[in-house]
Every structure is written in structure tokens, then in C-alpha cells.
Image: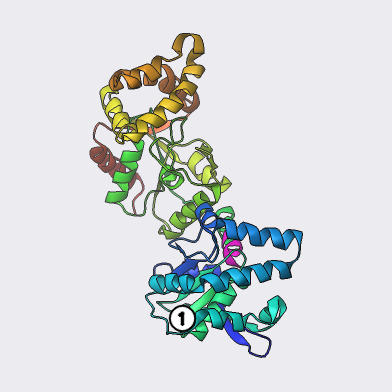
Amino acid sequence: MPGAKHRIEVPVVAAREVLAAEGRVTVIDLRSPGEFAEDHLPGAVNVPLFDDVERAVVGTLYRRESPESAFREARERTIEKIEQLVSGIAEVAAWTPPRTDLRAKVAEMTQDGMRGMEGGLELAPRTELEAGAVVLSCWRGGLRSRSVVALLGELGLERALALEGGYRAYRAHVRAELAELTAPARTFVLRGLTGVGKTLVLRAVEELRPGWTVDLEGIAGHRSSILGMVGLAPVTQKAFESGLAARLRARTAGRPCVFEGESRKVGDVILPERVWGALVGGESLELVASTARRVDVLIEDYLAKDESRAELTRQLPFIEERLGKKKWAGVLVGLLAEERDRELVELLLEHYYDPLYRHSEGKHAYATRIDAESAEDAARDVVAWIEARQPL
């Protein structure tokens, strides 16, 4: 926003430093809500400079006319909504901005156009972040974040910095982390028929030994089956990789790593190669439970929310078709509509899930078998078994 005669120092910091300081700094994402929803830095708060429509307009002008045309449009929209933007940042940053004419200030700082603005910003890399720092991120660390940091600095928020390279640099960092991952030396995989409670046991293990587990389904927002999205909010591939990298980053080196058995795809997201290799190479532990227990688990998991019934009504015809449209058409949906839930789940287990699981998982050799009638008891048995054979 500064003119060529008034150079402003803009502190910038790399994604690596921001991630290392997670929990001690505030990250504000200036991108549009749609960009933010696709993926963002861990713990980031969205305070958009432009909404999705405004971003699309500016982007279209940039591509079809010129960068200067896009800049002029962005300038007018920024002047119009700058009070709202600064107010949002102030609330997230726990900061009280000074009383001033923000519109006039932005107009003055941007009066020399895009080139003048770029020439007036002097980037100052930082290698450390103090507690309380406010890091602002945009798509590529360009004018969107740099200019806002410059403005905030002029207003007295000296702890504001721009994310160097923006979200794009952060994304590259995450991809590199996952590509260079060293698999945990001791990896264990919970396996068992659908409904045996693998996820429940995994989370109970985490309660007993924090940091041991990686809940792939929890990160993906999907149970990794044709009905796996019911009652959940599946995430994008980018968001999954961000969440996975954050979880792996937080793990203590040398500790056991416990996964739930998965295929290479969890819903629509694909496991990175190194993570898949760790899962495939892990020692398999078989969880077993009665059919009655498995039915209870699945009813609680899939039908705990009223809105899940509508989702299941839409999804069950896919299973009916796979089982044989002529024989099964409307059977499962009918049982659901009549609230014959236990009968429905028993049929699904007997005719669909159990045969499918035995076909795909039959190749695994199990190191031990653990009773999972109680998730908490099973978790204690898992921990005891691992610690007896893998002393810490």
C-alpha cells in the first residue's frame, strides 16, 4: 500500500518457523472462504480480504486484462471494506487499533499503483517468532498479505508478519515432509471385521498412551467405506495431508505408532506413499467381537444423528445394486424406513461387509488376537501386548 517515496519494512517468516511455533503464534489467513475451506495452516483463522465472488472478479481481470486492472479493482474493494478487515484482524489478534481514517490511509498508500506499491515494500526475513506474533497468509505471499502487514505496522501492530511464499510455500513444505517421512520403527495395525470397534479401540489407546496413534479416518473425516461419509465431514486431499503432517509432526520419535487398518484410499483421499508403506509394513493385531456388539457399534456410529438416516437413504441403493439389483432393490432402504435398524445392520454385515473384508484382508498374518467387546479393555490389552514385546 505504500507509495514509492515511502518505503515500509515488511517482516516475513518461513512456513517452517511458523509450524515450529504452533500454539504460540496466531495465524490469520486472508484468502477467500473457499480457498480457506480447501486447506490452511494448522490453527489458522480466516479473515478474508475478499469473498469468493470478489476474488473471482479480481482473478478474471488479472488473466483477461492485466495485473494493473486487477490491482485497481482490488484497491477499490479494499478501500470499501478496510474497516471490516482491520476489525476482524484486531479481534483475532487481541489488539486495539488506533482511531484513524482507514479508507483515506489505504487510498494514500496505494495511490502509485501496483508497481509503486511493490517498490515501496522492503521485505525483512525473520528466523524466529516471538510468542504473540501474528502471521498473515495469502495464496503466494504477494501483495495481499504484504500490504496488509504494512498497513498493520503503520497502525502500530508491530508483531504482524507475512508468511513468506504464502499458502503455496506451506503446501510445498507439507508435501516435502510427507515425501521425506521416516517410518516409525515400531508400527502396529488394528484390524478386524466391520463394526468390531477399531476406531474406538484406537482412540482408547490414545487416551492411555498419548501420541501413540495416527487416526487416519479421523483426519480424513471418512470411515473408508461406501457409507463412510455418513454423519461426517470429509476433507480435501490437501486438508488431509495438512492434518496428517501435523499429527506426524507432533509425535515423539521412538514411540510406537498404532494405525487402524485401511486401504490406500480413505474415502476420496489417498495415503501418501511413505505412510502407506508404514501401514502395510506394520504388525497386525486382530480385534474380534460378537455380532451383537458389532451391530451396537455400527448403530451408534451411523445412526446417532437424525440427519444420518437421510444420508443413508441416499447411499444404500449403491450397496443394493452391488448385492444384486433384482433381488435387493429397495430391501435395505425399506428396512431403514421402517426403523428395523438391527435387522438392516445384520444383513449388511452378513451379505456385504464381512465377505468384502475377508476378501481384502484375508492375506494378513495376525500377531495376536484381542477381544474387543469393550473398547477400553481392548485398548489396555493392546498397550500391554506392545509394551511386553517392545519395551520402551
Residue 202 percent coordinates (x, y): 34, 43
Q: Position of residue 131 (x, y in %)?
A: 40, 77
Taken as a whole, is the magenta stretch helix, strand or loop? helix
**Residue 293 magenta-drawn?**
no
Q: Residues within 10 Å of mark 1 (few under 14, many from 20)?
A: some
Is 215 in front, or is 142? 142
Closest to the observer, 331 or 323: 331
Image quadrant in which you'd find residue 10 = bottom right
Up-down: is 49 above or below 380? below
In the figure, is residue 246 to the left or right of 172?
A: left
Can residue 101 be seen from the camera position used here? yes
Q: Residue furthest right?
A: 65
**Residue 252, percent from left and from top:** 40, 59
Give the residue at mark 1: 159
Mark 1, secondary structure of its residue: loop
Q: Foreground: 123 or 202?
A: 123
In the image, 92 versus 198, the foreground residue is 92
Q: How is the image coloured?
A: rainbow
Magenta residues, as a range?
Answer: 165-171
Residue, far bottom: 5
Residue at image x 49%, y 78%? 160
The N terminus lies in quadrant: bottom right
Amino acid carrying label 1: it is Arg
Q: Would you say residue 126 is visible in this rendering?
A: no
The reply, left or right, for residue 127 in relation to residue 217 is right
Question: Hey, which residue is sitting farthest top in the picture?
Answer: 327
In percent of width and height, residue 139 lies at 60, 63
Number of numbered tags placed on the structure image: 1
- Examine the rendered structure and indicate whether residue 283 appears above or below residue 133: above
Q: Which residue sits at x=35%, y=29%?
A: 309
